[in-house]
Structures are given as C-alpha cells and as structure tokens.
Image: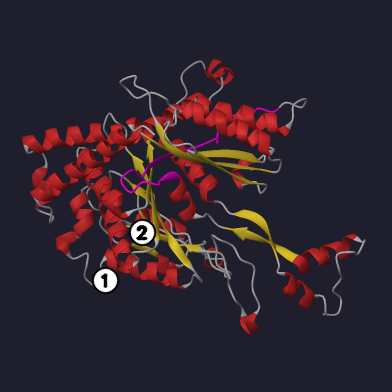
C-alpha cells in the first residue's frame, strides 16, 4: 500500500497565496510503480492549489514561457479580478453572496481540491495556509475550512495563519481575526499561528552582535524577511523524510528467483546493493498530519500551535565535541529565543509539543532524552501531562539547512496564543459596542449574531486553555 496522502489548499495572504500538498504513489503503464514524492506528482507538478481573489500574485506561478510553466497546474491556479476589501464577510460570503453558486471562487477551489484528492491513493487530510486578518485570507480561508470539513468530515484539517502586528495594519483586522479564528478552530484539527511581532523578535535575535556593530544601527526587518522565515518554518515541518521500508520475507524469496538477483551473503558492493533492493527499498514519506495533530493538539477545544525553527540561527559547531552535544547546544539556543512570558510578565504554560530534528548525524537515545527534558523544562509544560513532548528524527537534511545540513523545528501548544486572541477579542468588542465598521460586514451578508457567536467562541477557547493550564493530576 502507498503512504497516506495529504491535500491542502490556501487562499491568498495579502499578496501571498496558499498551497495544497498531497501524497500518493503513481502507477505507470504496465503496472510499474514510478518514483514517489510526497510534494510532487510523477509529471512534475506540485500537489498544490493556489487561490486568490486577485491575479497579480498567483500568475507568477505560471510563467509565459511554455518551457518553464512552473510547478502548478493551470487548473489549480484560481483567481478573480477583484479583491475582498480586507473584509471577512466579503471573503466568506462573496460578492452578493454568490460564493456557493457554480463558477464562484469557492466552487472552483473545491472542484480543484476534489481532483487533487482523487489523485491520491489514500487521502489523509488538508493543510491550508492563509492570512488571519486579510479579506481573502480570513474570509475565503475560513470558508474553505468549513466547506472541506463538510465534504470530508473524517479527514484531518490543519491550518497555518499569519496574524498581523499588534499595533495595527488594517482597520478591520480585529474583526477579521476573531471571525477567522472562531471558524477555523471549530472545524480544523489544528491551527498554526505566526504572529508578526514574534517573528520580528526572533529575526532580531538572529542577528549576531558582530553584525549589529558593523551596521552601527538596529537591523531593518521587512515583510520579505518575515515571509522567508515563515516559509522555512513550514518547510522544515512538511519536508519529506527518507526511510528504509523492509520487504516481507515472502516477497524477498520471490524476487530471489529472478535471474541476476543475489542473496544477502554476497560480498561485493554491487551485490550488496542488489540485495538491499531485494530485501527492501528507501522511500520518501510525507508529513504525517494525523500524527502531528494527535500529539500536539490532543484536545478538541485547545488547538492553537506555535511553530519555531532554527532557520537563520547561527549553528553552533565545535570540532572537539560530539554531534550529540551540538544538537543539545543548538536546541538550547533555539529555546532561549522563544518567549516564556506574556506581555503581563506571567509565565506561559505548555500543554504539548513536537520537535523535529533533521540532519545527517542524529543524537543517541540518551542524548535525545536529555534534549526532551531540557525542552520540557524550558517550555514550562503542565505537570498533569507526564509525556508532553514528542521528538521526530530523520537523517535526511532539508534544502534550507545548508551548509550545516541540519535543522530543528519546534511546534508547541501553549497558552500564549489564547491570550493574544483574548486581547484581539476585547478590542473587537469595543469596536462592536461603539458600532464602528459594523455596517461594512452587515451589507455583505453577516449578521449581528455572527459577531456575538464569534466572541463567544473565542471566550470558549480562552476558558479551555485556562482550565487546562491550572488542571492538576
């Protein structure tokens, strides 16, 4: 059987689009099995869908040169000619509430999603990337999550959203964030949220003191740097791994009967290679979404996840030390940059986490336990959970980890994001009580009950995290 497959769609994030990934084994003519890749089909096209309400960004994925058509199918690049005005209601319900009709942006996206799901041998779930506060990202993104849940009720849904700066980027960002978080948290199995403030803080810490002295001033961080860091965090999470899959003994005995096959007792290197192919094969495995959500988001009312990566952090390497010590040192370096207190100087509790270690040289089981203990203590994991952490290791390095050929990514379910949503909800309630911008949503299909339901949903999320953080054994 083929490895499980994952499909994910993403609406645009204020000029950036979402992507859909899937996994399946391709069977060629005559029943021959082609090379499997979790992120690409055998014809070279990515298992991805790009959706945006404006054409200027998604068209970049389709160059005019026919010899360089990009990695995306034309039918999977979906756009309209007008935006959503940074309005959740306009993105969710669509212009004149026609998003459910045939030919609408939602209908086209769902049709492409269905085709990608059918290309998978075993459809596992979807991974949607979008903005938390933009009109297309928040409105269309949350609508897609709800529609996919309705069409595939038993499949896993994971979302990755980018939250705006706390000081404000858009006049409607508080409304949009509350609406989007309420809908996605209800239907998704896990929500990864990147806060722009936290990403900028991480990037500033990544600059060494030497660089600051040379520049003579504080380094300037732009949206391009933020987007690059977020993309590398997600890449470190979903990039495929390489594992050896052993064949059953009955299959190995059957293959040994063919001319030219050899047994495991052969001494030459070529013979050993043939024996390896006979007894098993190396296989690329995609991101296991179900395993991730079950470990990091085990509670149905607590699904908010922070994602951090060692991307941009100078890798500490000592020729006199072992590789295990290097892993421990660099893990400590990453943990030291993750905020442990909220804006009120109160400690942040962690319910569960998952760490991915990618590199050619992996730590031993003893050092792995040491890393896990260090991570559990630094994150302030709750006492009632005896096994809050999970560490995944693979010897296959990712592309972004050069020249160190190693990377560390950490996904943590902590109480920091609920406090952020609570602050956003309070600002949205103040605007709602004053009647500010309410009519912008009402004229596009939203009702006052939708505001109250969203506020209540966020309150439920905050209450659930508060209860879990103080819960005893």
Span of residues in magenta:
296-317
In the rendered structure, the answer to whether residue 458 lies left or right of residue 404 reads left
**Residue found at the very far front of the displayed protein:** 473
Q: Is residue 382 left or right of residue 446?
A: right
Task: Name the residue carrying label 2.
Answer: 51
Q: Please, what is the dominant secondary structure of the magenta stretch?
A: loop
Give the mark nearest the N terminus, 2 or 1: 2
Q: Is residue 304 magenta?
A: yes
- The residue that label 1 is drawn on is 103
**Residue 54, relative to residue 41: is it above or below?**
above
Image quarter where the N terminus lies is bottom right
Distance (Cα) linking label 2 and label 1: 14 Å
Nearer the observer, 464 or 307: 464
Mark 1 lies on a secondary structure that is loop
Query: Is 390 in front, or is 5?
Result: 390
* Residue 198 image position (x, y, % from top left): 40, 31
Above or below, comparing residue 55 to residue 274 in the picture: above
Locate the C terminus and report the quarter of the image it occupies. Answer: top left
Residue 4 screen position, x and y as percent:
52, 64
């Amino acid at each position: 059987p083929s490895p499980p497959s994952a499909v994910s769609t993403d609406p645009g994030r204020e000029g950036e689009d979402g992507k859909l990934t899937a996994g399946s084994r391709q069977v060629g003519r005559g029943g021959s099995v082609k090379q499997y890749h979790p992120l690409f089909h055998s014809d070279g096209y990515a298992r991805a869908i790009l959706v945006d309400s404006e054409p200027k960004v998604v068209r970049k994925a389709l160059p005019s040169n026919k010899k360089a058509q990009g990695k995306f199918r034309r039918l999977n690049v979906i756009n309209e000619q007008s935006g959503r005005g940074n309005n959740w209601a306009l993105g969710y319900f669509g212009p004149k509430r026609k998003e459910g009709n045939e030919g609408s942006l939602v209908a086209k996206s769902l049709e492409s999603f269905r085709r990608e799901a059918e290309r998978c041998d075993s459809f596992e779930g979807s991974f949607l990337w979008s903005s938390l506060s933009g009109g297309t990202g928040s409105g269309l993104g949350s609508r897609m999550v709800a529609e996919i849940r309705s069409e595939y009720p038993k499949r896993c849904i994971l979302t990755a959203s980018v939250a705006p700066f706390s000081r404000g980027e858009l006049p409607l960002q508080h409304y949009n964030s509350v609406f989007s978080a309420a809908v996605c948290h209800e239907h998704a199995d896990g929500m990864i949220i990147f806060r722009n403030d936290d990403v900028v803080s991480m990037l500033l810490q990544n600059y060494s003191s030497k660089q600051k002295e040379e520049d003579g001033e504080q380094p300037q961080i732009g949206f391009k740097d933020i987007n690059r860091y977020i993309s590398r965090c997600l890449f470190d999470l979903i990039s495929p791994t390489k594992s050896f899959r052993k064949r059953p003994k009955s299959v190995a005995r059957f293959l040994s009967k063919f001319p030219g096959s050899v047994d495991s007792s052969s001494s030459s290197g070529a013979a050993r290679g043939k024996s390896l192919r006979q007894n098993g094969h190396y296989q690329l495995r995609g991101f296991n979404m179900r395993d991730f959500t079950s470990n990091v988001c085990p509670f149905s009312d607590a699904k908010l996840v922070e994602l951090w990566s060692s991307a941009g952090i100078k890798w500490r390497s000592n020729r006199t030390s072992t590789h295990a010590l290097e892993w421990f040192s660099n893990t400590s370096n990453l943990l030291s940059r993750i905020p442990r207190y909220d804006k009120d100087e109160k400690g942040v509790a962690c319910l569960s986490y998952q760490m991915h270690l990618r590199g050619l040289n992996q730590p031993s089981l003893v050092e792995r336990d040491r890393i896990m203990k260090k991570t559990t203590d630094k994150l302030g994991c709750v006492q009632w959970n005896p096994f809050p952490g999970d560490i995944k290791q693979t010897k296959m390095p990712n592309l972004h980890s050069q020249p160190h050929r190693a990377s560390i990514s950490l996904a943590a379910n902590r109480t920091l994001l609920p406090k952020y949503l609570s602050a956003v909800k309070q600002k949205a309630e103040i605007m709602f009580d004053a009647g500010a911008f309410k009519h912008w949503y009402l004229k596009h299909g939203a009702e006052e009950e939708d505001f109250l339901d969203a506020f209540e949903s966020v309150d439920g999320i905050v209450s659930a995290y508060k209860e879990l953080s103080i819960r005893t054994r």
